[in-house]
Image: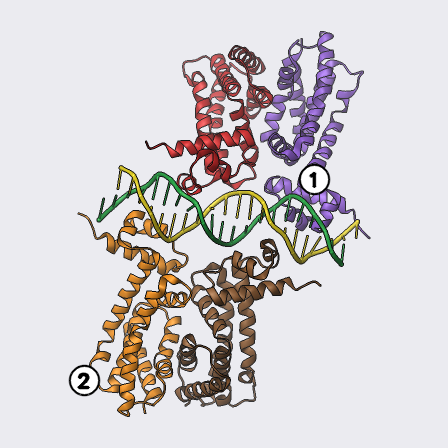
Chain colours: A purple, B red, C brown, D orange, E green, F yellow
Amino acid sequence: MTIDRRRQILDAALSAFLERGYAATSIADIRARSGASTGSIYHFFSGKGALAEALLREAVSGWAKQSTAALDPAASPEAALKASVRGLMLWGLAHPAQFRFMDEIRALAPADPDFSAVRDLLDDGQAAAAAQYAGMTRAGAVRNIPFSIAYALILGPAYAYLRRAGATSEAEATRLADFFAEAAWQAVKA
Amino acid sequence: MTIDRRRQILDAALSAFLERGYAATSIADIRARSGASTGSIYHFFSGKGALAEALLREAVSGWAKQSTAALDPAASPEAALKASVRGLMLWGLAHPAQFRFMDEIRALAPADPDFSAVRDLLDDGQAAAAAQYAGMTRAGAVRNIPFSIAYALILGPAYAYLRRAGATSEAEATRLADFFAEAAWQAVKA
Amino acid sequence: MTIDRRRQILDAALSAFLERGYAATSIADIRARSGASTGSIYHFFSGKGALAEALLREAVSGWAKQSTAALDPAASPEAALKASVRGLMLWGLAHPAQFRFMDEIRALAPADPDFSAVRDLLDDGQAAAAAQYAGMTRAGAVRNIPFSIAYALILGPAYAYLRRAGATSEAEATRLADFFAEAAWQAVKA
Amino acid sequence: MTIDRRRQILDAALSAFLERGYAATSIADIRARSGASTGSIYHFFSGKGALAEALLREAVSGWAKQSTAALDPAASPEAALKASVRGLMLWGLAHPAQFRFMDEIRALAPADPDFSAVRDLLDDGQAAAAAQYAGMTRAGAVRNIPFSIAYALILGPAYAYLRRAGATSEAEATRLADFFAEAAWQAVKA
DNA sequence: GATGAATGAGCTTTCATTCAT
DNA sequence: AATGAATGAAAGCTCATTCAT
């Protein structure tokens, strides 16, 4: 009988955040869209920030799944790096609104104390990626440059493209993902 | 004797936006920092959004000055393109807080109706840049790819780097600017 | 234990409107008089206009009860018409402050967009009354004049008197009501 | 060269009051419509209330001119009384917006301290009229009823009609004025 | 006479959050 | 698990009015 309230709330929150932006979305909006009561929302989530965080966690994990190969320790540097970029692109092109939501939260995070956890979440990949890049550098596979720069060269174009991208067919998405993956590899290969 | 209240208000607003973020800054913050009264602020600006817009306009024009060479019609494609990237990098590294302010507004713009004008402002350079790139393409100087992609390849890395950058010495800034300019050229040259 | 907050708010609003006038009453006044919090007021009513509307609806229904006989389909034209006037007079003399509140809202309604619903409410009786008068005209009971004129002749004097009336004893009220009812009948009878 | 600023301000204020209502009109509205500066407005008028008062005084005097015959000491009671009603009707039908402005101010007056002077102004005619009616009563020309009631019978219908009236042709206005004048006389003649 | 910058109290309204039921 | 009434601080903004020039 009872449906998954938690799920309903998350779905409603996501739709509101995507449509109106995080800052402009009120708990009342989420209440109206979810059909849940105010109290119910607070029963499951400690506040608006926690909702955003939960959604972001889902988004990031969805994106991570697209990039699995990147984490395959047996993969070649080229394959791993390209898989990273391809994963970001495919996920971002498939979910443009979610990408923009992520981007909004990222921009708000430095100022909003609600988002210290989110910042960590978004930075989480960084440490691992930095370590991986260091390994590739030692193996002589990529240019020996600071990771902060390498990161910008590898993912910067994809981010910039996605920020302006709209709905994209799957075929086109694959082509774009391959293109940006190749460009990323060219930018940092030794 | 008479001080420039408008200027004082703008300065106070900028300092508050940079320090606390746009969303977290209240008119009361600006009032306290500027010494002007609430009414005075509204006498000069129609609201918080208008303040942000005015500041953004100033920021963009400051940045544009750094990139003048990019607009020199006599410059070679390579020089023009590199000057664009170098201009963005030098300005962003010299004013990291302003860059992040710009980034926050850009992220907020799609959702906030206050910022329709801002979106246009930030997109303004686009048309000119697209035309310029088209010219370079016809001249065979750069890769024949859609401008939206070229734009991501050229400026994406710089944006990504600046989003995470902190204070940087001038010498280091020059080196970084040159580095990203060169990388941008390599990414799109024919 | 639990008190009827909605009722408390309405009562407080009415007392404030009657005492200070609608325009001069602030939400803070109502908050102070009702003991409810600002948020509570907005939880039940969408704003000052909605409060006035709710109160007006109550007032109008109270007045309508005084005029029931006017709606008795079996009543003679003379009885029906007199009951209308008598009802207005008795209600207005018994509640002079409410009458003036109604009058203020009516005067504000044309200019204030909050009150489009109120205007309709106040005009509502009109259509029914016009139909009734048309019937009386066909029956040859009253003068064959446009309803807008008949309306002014019938209720105009009562309105004009009530606008300046103060507290009145019940006996005096009955006498006045009868007097204006008789005058109204004399003014329009065939 | 210099035009009559005072006049411009009055005209602008009237147009604003008529269009948006007194309460909803701000000094800024009047400034914008008149072309005068804020300071200029306050140079001529002590505030919003004083502006309304000045306009009301003009309106009342315009109306008074229409009713001159009413004040002719030689006129018969019937002629005097009818001239009063006819004057109100003709002026009100010729200036429906001004009539409604007057009505709004009258409704606001009891609550707004700005308008003590206005109340007196609107009541001014009363004392003279009451004396005149007392004279007619003594002469046996009209019913021996309290003036407050007689006033309601005489002018109530005209007021009620004018509150709902729109633009009216001059011929129609004359007919209506005569009609209401006759009705007023019938209502109170001995 | 005329200007418009400056004031600041006061307004309506929104909102995340709490809590008794 | 669920409700929704209640809270009250804080927000953005308006406005009549003053006053130095």
- The amino acid beneath tag 1 is Leu
Give me the chain letter of mark 2.
D
Left/right of residue D178 with respect to residue C178 in the rendered view:
left
Q: Is residue A190 visible?
A: yes
Residue closest to the eye, B159 or B141: B159
- Residues marked 2 and 1 touching at CB (< 8 Å): no
Classify C138 as above or below A56: below
- The amino acid beneath tag 2 is Ala
Residue D133 drawn at (x, y percent): 29, 84
From the image, which quarter does the C terminus of chain C lie in? bottom left
Sort mark 1 into few (<14), some (14-19) or many (20+) by Cα contacts within 10 Å: some
Q: Residue at x 49, y 68 (%)?
A: C18
Residue D8 drawn at (x, y percent): 26, 54
Q: Are marks 2 and 1 on the same chain?
A: no
Give me the chain letter of mark 1.
A
Residue A21 drawn at (x, y percent): 60, 39
In the rendered image, the residue lying farthest to the left is D1
Mark 1 lies on residue = A51
Residue closest to the eye, C15 or A25: C15
Left/right of residue A16 with respect to residue D185 in the rendered view:
right
From the image, which quarter does the N terminus of chain C lie in? bottom right
Residue D125 drawn at (x, y percent): 29, 75
Classify F1 as above or below B155: below
Look at discs 2 and 1 and give the one toward the viewer.
2
Q: Secondary structure at mark 2?
A: loop
Q: Residue at x 31, y 85 (%)?
A: D182
Residue closest to the eye, C95 or C149: C95
Instruction: Please give the label number shown on residue D74.
Output: 2
For marks 2 and 1, give the CA distance: 86 Å
Q: Secondary structure at mark 1?
A: helix
Classify E17 as above or below D89: above
Examine the image and state in which quarter residue C163 appears.
bottom left
